[in-house]
């Protein structure tokens, strides 16, 4: 009987230690993998529609090869992006080399979540502003590069970005004047 109590106590302690370690691993943030130095964009080369930020000469920007771990409710920051030609999204979408209408619910994900194109054309569910919407992944919000022509002279994305078309914002019921940044959760659909 005494041996059973000792074994049960050891099992409980061991289980608590494993759960604590697991929770710490899951909560581990994505740390910067490097920095890039900003360059001044050539005149009229950085599209500031949707309040996009242009790189600043000499400013250092963090880069990320990772994103926070994906769970059933992954915390993220929703930004607005133009996926149409001539909009602030820069070039064509990474998944298919085409531009897409901002009137359909589509997103670009930070580099780690984009996962070397493994999420291309897959749907995610975005929860925010008391609503939810399904959106298709068509592009990468590059967290490893920026401040160049290919990236519309914009800084690298943070590691936790879901960059969404106006259709996503509309479906979430966010008024135009409030579009730009929103704390959200998302999951694979």
Image: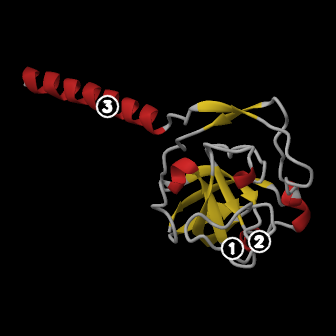
Report helix, strand or loop for mark 1.
loop
Q: Name the N-terminal-most of marks 2 and 3.
A: 3
Which image quadrant is residue 84 in? bottom right
Which residue is at a point 18% across and 29% down the rendered structure image? Answer: 8
Question: Which residue appears at 55% of the width and 36% of the height?
Answer: 30
Residue drawn at (83%, 53%), measured in percent from left and top?
Answer: 52
Number of the front mark, 3 or 1: 1
> Would you call the spot at circle 2 few (<14 residues within 10 Å), some (14-19), or many (20 or more)?
some
Q: Position of residue 15 (x, y in %)?
A: 28, 32
- On the image, numbered disc 1 is attached to which residue? 99
Q: Which residue is mark 3?
A: 18
Looking at the rendered image, the disc whose residue lies closer to the viewer, 2 or 3, is 2
The answer to which of 78 and 132 lies nearer the viewer is 78
What is the secondary structure assignment of the residue under circle 3? helix
What residue is pinned by disc 2? 85
Q: Are marks 1 and 2 in contact (CB under 8 Å)?
A: yes
Quadrant (top left, top right, bottom left, bottom right) of the N terminus? top left
Left or right for 88, reference 6: right
Identify which residue is drawn at 78% across, 72% down: 170
For the residues labelled 2 and 3, the Cα–Cα distance comes to: 50 Å
């Amino acid at each position: 009987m005494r041996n059973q109590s000792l074994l049960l106590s050891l099992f409980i302690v061991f289980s608590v230690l494993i759960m604590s370690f697991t929770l710490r691993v899951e909560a581990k943030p994505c740390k910067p993998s490097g920095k890039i130095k900003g360059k001044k964009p050539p005149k009229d080369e950085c599209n500031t529609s949707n309040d996009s930020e242009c790189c600043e000469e000499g400013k250092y920007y963090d880069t990320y090869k990772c994103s926070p771990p994906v769970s059933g409710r992954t915390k993220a920051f929703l930004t607005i992006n133009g996926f149409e030609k001539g909009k602030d999204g820069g070039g064509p979408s990474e998944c298919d080399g085409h531009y897409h209408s901002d009137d359909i619910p589509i997103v670009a994900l930070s580099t780690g979540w984009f996962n070397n194109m493994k999420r291309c054309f897959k749907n995610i569910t975005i929860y925010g502003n008391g609503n939810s919407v399904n959106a298709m992944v068509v592009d990468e919000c590059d967290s490893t590069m920026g401040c160049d022509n290919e990236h519309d002279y914009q800084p690298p994305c943070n590691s936790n970005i879901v960059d969404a078309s106006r259709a996503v914002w509309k479906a979430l019921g966010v008024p135009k004047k409030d579009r730009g940044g929103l704390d959200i959760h998302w999951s694979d659909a």
